[in-house]
Amino acid sequence: MTGELERLARRFQGHEPGLLGASRSYAVLCPLVEGEEGLRLLFEVRAPQLRQGGEVCFPGGKMEPGESVSDCALRETEEELSIPRREITLLGAPDFICNQRGFLLRPVLGTVSASGLAAMRPSPAEVAEVFTVPLSFFRETAPEIRRYALIPQVPEDFPYDAVGISRNYPWSQGQVEVPIWHYQGHVIWGMTARLVREITRQSFLETPQGGPPSPLPDSGSHGRDKFTSGGDGAEISIPAR
């Protein structure tokens, strides 16, 4: 093996593939809390002085060099909500989002203990409010769906002749789906809603012992596409202190 081949072999042995071209990654915790009526998802409302202030999101932020997804999600949750990481039990990592702006959004699903919820103190610098929504609400309530197109804008000086294509080349276009839920005065939408939709979808799946997840029957209220309007339950709403 030549020296160049050896260098390539050393470089790629044990390499964990990432997304080519991704400029940065963010991690968020999708926090579940248990109540008498069942599981609830915990959300933040971003402080008004922040970029995208007033929007609903999960606790999280940009991953630091060498930081794992779970470590970032736990660190950011502790910084934003003062929930100690020892009070959070991680359940796993749902599918992540590749944003068209070139970054990855990496979710981690976890449960917050009663002690962790009692210790929660939202940071006024980052969080205006915290509230929870029953997971059953998302199962039973169809989101409003909006879509927008991603249309390529090719520069006039693109070297069509050099690459061997005509000016009417069929450039690929895309589309982004935006789910929107309304819950007691709050709007859960965009990437946060896409993560919620995936968590909700997975909650409909059963994992047989020794086998992969299998969908529940489509009959009755358990079918993946059997959403009905409704969903209720007392809301926890905690302003920043």
Image: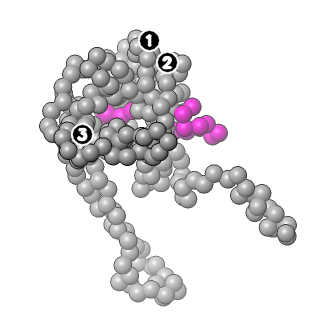
How far separated are the C-alphas under marks 1 and 2?
7 Å
Residue matched to label 2: 87
Asked if the residues shown at circle 1 and circle 2 are in contact, with their CB atoms under 8 angstroms apart, the answer is: yes
Residue 226 horizontal side relative to residue 159, left or right: left
- Res. 43 image quadrant: top left
Magenta stretch: includes residue 57 = yes
Residue matched to label 1: 115
Q: Amino acid at mark 1?
A: Ser
The part of the chain drawn in magenta is: 55-71
Whether 34 is drawn above or below 43: the answer is above
Q: Secondary structure at mark 1?
A: helix
Whether 43 is drawn above or below 87: the answer is below
Q: Quadrant of the C terminus?
A: top left
Q: Secondary structure at mark 2?
A: helix
Checking the image for residue 222, the label placed there is 3
Q: What x and y, as percent, mark residue 236?
A: 28, 18
Asked if the residues shown at circle 2 and circle 3 are in contact, with their CB atoms under 8 angstroms apart, the answer is: no
- Residue 50 visible, this angle: no
How far separated are the C-alphas under marks 1 and 3?
32 Å
Q: What x and y, as percent, mark residue 189?
A: 28, 41
Q: Secondary structure at mark 3?
A: helix
Mark 2 or mark 3: whose residue is earlier in sequence: 2
- Res. 39 image quadrant: top left
Residue 116 horizontal side relative to residue 137, left or right: right
